[in-house]
Image (cartoon, coloured by chain):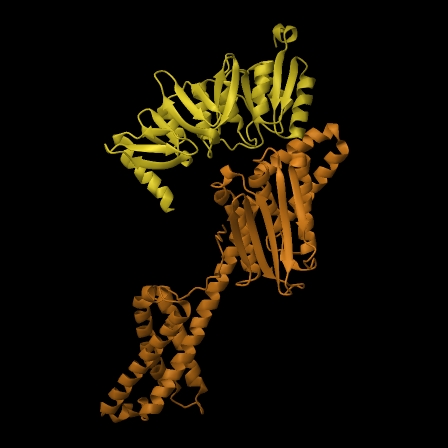
Chain colours: A yellow, B orange
Amino acid sequence: MSDTHESIPLRVLIVDDEQPARERLQRLIAELGHYELIGQAENATTALELCQQLQPDVVLLDVRMPGMTGIEVAQHLNLLDEPPAVIFTTAYEEYAVDAFEAEAIGYLLKPIRKEKLERALQHAVRLSTHRLQQLSNHQAQNTARTHLCVKRGEALRLIPMKEVRYFVAEQKYITIHHTHGTDLIDESLKDLSVEFADSFIRIHRNSLVAENNIASIERDPEGQYKIYLRESTESLSVSRRHSAAVLKRLRGVHEE
Amino acid sequence: MRTPINNSPVARHFHLPDFCTAGSTLAVVLIVELVALLLTVARQPLQINFWVDLSGNSLFMLWQGLISSAVLCRCRAWLTQRPVTQAYMLTLALIVSIALLVSECIYQVGQSTTIGLLEDLFPSQHFMFLLRTGSIAFIVSSLALRYFHVTAEWRSSVELEAQARIRALQARIRPHFLFNSMNTIASLTRSDPARAEEAVEDLADLFRANLSEARSWISLKEELEIARIYQRIESLRLGDRLKVEWKIHDIPLRALVPSLLVQPLLENAVYHGIEPLSEGGSITVSGSFDGQLIELSVTNPLPDKATLLLHTGHGIALDNIRQRLQLAWPGQATVELQQSIGTYKVIMRFPYQDQHV
């Protein structure tokens, strides 16, 4: 233990949906002494807000939470200019992470032992996006994110995937068209189309549309297919290369 | 939109041993010899030429037995594809016809034989002879088939029970639940020792119920008590997020049931229905009784993203309950799943029974 801990204590945020679990972590941190607990969040959204406001050094993040998993929260946190270090907490190893990996990424099993918590806090490091992606792949279920996180100035905003209508790839960024407007994200359309393959259809080299947002598909006199969106007059063109696959998938939906 | 997903019927099976094996052939020979002995001994009065009689009978019946085995060996695949009752009828018919055919041959040989010494061995009355062999073949093979059926049923029920027991131990308490409860207790130990103590007692009761014999019977009252204990433990952890409505005033609490029917369903409901909702939700346990059948159901909210997971997750506990209900009331108990938008419901129906059989 170095002197730095005593001079500038690490600032810790607890995220867990269960009150007894939060209370226990709070007590353990108090007993350890050289850490400052700066806040507690009981769900993912609050966690992201508090992280922006309070800028903790370390976040103790429960993996299984309603709405959004801890792993997804960590993915969003990584968009911050200075993301906090993350230590995952969970009651049961459902993510098939072996012991070595667990050490490397900071993965604590509940009920958490004080010594293990201390060691994890001392070695807490920021997770790389790559690592998080690996971890996300370990998840047996729901690998697709439930929200997209966008930056507006310094602030992070969460956009529920349910509200996303379509993506259009611009030169460098992707524009998300959602029910409350548009936002830019720095991701690739290819990755998005893989991640959300269940609910989104690629209709063009540069666009990806939410399947349940499609009102109709029509063919214009030149033989070009166009997709009309629900509750809107907008239309998007379907490229020749994608038209067969789009038609097949939409037909499949209606026949079910 | 209601989709009844499963209504477990009791499958009755056609149990015919594989007569192509040496073991079965030996069994056939033994049965035939025993029957031959029985017939010879039963003859009044016991003649001096007992051994000659016995060998005659044996020879005659071995022909029938072994030809039947050979034919059944070839027809087995075809027979097992037929409906159960039909398969048994066909098997009987095959055996009886073979017996008649063999008898007919013997009779014809007897008619054409001229050696005086052997004449006593052959039957003289044509019709009576066929009737006698036919009915003996019918009675003996019915008994044998019944024996095979009962043994096979018994064996598969023993197997089912063993499987149910193993699965019960593996699957009943979710490790998740155990560790979360331990964590809750660890937290309460300091902040609220009295409640921590209560939680430990509750957890102990729950595990005692879980570790008891897979086939033990308890009253519905005790069964519901176990479910309530489970609810108490989960409430410590989930707080206001977990609400359980009990609508069970109409069911006879002294009814006997295999233990742990309700708690695993409640556990599923919490895991899949309540935990994924940040604002929580309400589970309904309701029961009704029509004088014969008791119906118990557990309804939980269904978060949309959990739709796909339900079948895998619910599967183990449900299979287990279904199997145990089957063992308890073969053919009379059902488990049904109903899934509609936003809710998921498991319904169990079983006969009312208030004393051990």
> Where residue A97 sits: x, y (%)?
48, 28
Query: Which corner quadrant of the image does residue B115 belong to?
Result: bottom left
Left/right of residue A38 with respect to residue A194 in the rendered view: right
**In this view, B112 is above or below A30:** below
Q: Is residue A252 left or right of residue A44?
A: left
Q: Answer above or below: position of A123 versus B310.
A: above
Q: Nearer the viewer, residue B272 or B109?
A: B272
Residue A77, x across and y down, in percent: 51, 19
| Quarter in which the C terminus of chain B is drawn | bottom right
Foreground pick, B227 / B148: B227
Q: Is residue B66 above or below residue A55?
A: below
Q: Is residue B215 visible?
A: yes
The residue depicted at 56 percent of the width and 26 percent of the height is A44
How far across and how far down the image is residue B2, in percent? 50, 51
In the image, is B278 to the left or to the right of A161?
right
Q: Position of residue B234 (x, y in %)?
A: 65, 38
- Residue occupying the point 37% across, 42% down: A253
Residue A199 at least partly seen = no
